[in-house]
Image (cartoon, rainbow, N blue to C red):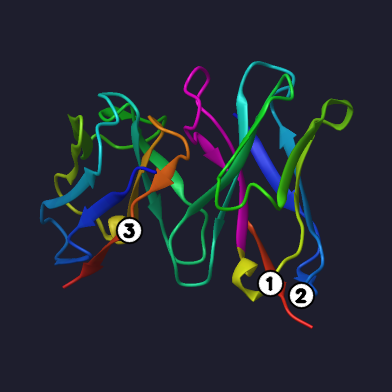
Amino acid sequence: QVQLQESGPGLVEPSGTLSLTCAVFGVSISNPNWWSWVRQPPGKGLEWIGEIYHSGSTSYNPSLKSRVIVSVDKSNNQFSLRLISVTAADTAVYYCASGIVGARGSVNQWGQGTLVIVSS
Amino acid sequence: EVVLTQSPGTLSLSPGDRATVSCRASQSVGSINLAWHQQKPGQAPRLLIYGASSRATGIPDRFSGSGSGTDFTLTISRLEPEDFAVYYCQQFGHSPWTFGQGTKVEIK
């Protein structure tokens, strides 16, 4: 059973950089699979941010593509999200997720989520 | 991008009732690239259904999914108290992957 745990600062200043890490437990991140980030503004719906394959190949939501980087750290069995030039609109609960093997874009297991507030 | 429109926005039902949630896609997403997730207040979403009709591990058989192409349905045959939550459909047939706006199933 895969388990995912997000970590990172809960408060980021406007125009700053949001950085989160997702630790993966129960499976090697080097196994063939996609690893994703999804966010949810308070009281709103879910938005897919981007994903990374075990090989390092990435794909991003065009609405965020110019500001986001997802990377993988195989030595620590984790993957990360960086979002630059944040504004209040980036305030959200950020979830990391693992996909169903062989089904790119799917979400099989969710992390518990971490709230990031953009404010000075 | 594929827009997923869920209906109704809110469903007011009693325990034991049957719940039916619809998800319509702005273009075909195929027959297997559709999932349903359940989210309770203050919790992360949880995968219920993948491949349009396959239950995820540990999901009770009162939950079922159907549909293909642009029209999909989530059915809860008999609502249990723990089923009152928000339900989201998600498509992964065309990038960017997208979610519906959610359907809240509330106690009447």
Q: Considering depth in this image, is A26 or B90 the residue closer to the camera?
A: B90
Residue drawn where x is 74% and y is 25% of the image: A56
How much space separates mark 1 and mark 3, taking CA atoms? 25 Å
Callout 2 crowding tier (Cα within 10 Å): few <14, some 14–19, many ≥20? some
How much space separates mark 2 and mark 3, taking CA atoms? 29 Å
Q: Callout 2: residue from which chain?
A: A
Residue A73 lies in quadrant: top right
Residue B81 lies in quadrant: bottom left
Q: Callout 3: residue from which chain?
A: B
Q: Residue A80 location, x and y as percent? A: 77, 43
Q: Which structural element holds mark 3?
A: loop
Q: Which structural element holds mark 2?
A: loop
The kind of residue on which mark 1 rests is: Thr
Q: Residue B92 location, x and y as percent? A: 41, 33
The kind of residue on which mark 3 rests is: Gly
Question: Magenta residues, as a range?
Answer: A93-112
Residue drawn where x is 80% and y is 58% of the image: A8
Is the residue B94 above or below the residue B76 in the image?
above
Q: Residue B39 location, x and y as percent? A: 42, 56
Q: Which structural element holds mark 1?
A: loop
Q: Residue furthest bottom?
A: A120
The kind of residue on which mark 2 rests is: Pro
Do marks 2 and 3 share a subunit?
Answer: no
- Which residue corresponds to mark 1? A87
- Which residue corresponds to mark 2? A14
- Which residue corresponds to mark 3? B102
Q: Nearer the viewer, mark 1 or mark 3?
A: 1
Specify whether residue B30 is in view: yes
Q: Are marks 1 and 2 in contact (CB under 8 Å)?
A: yes
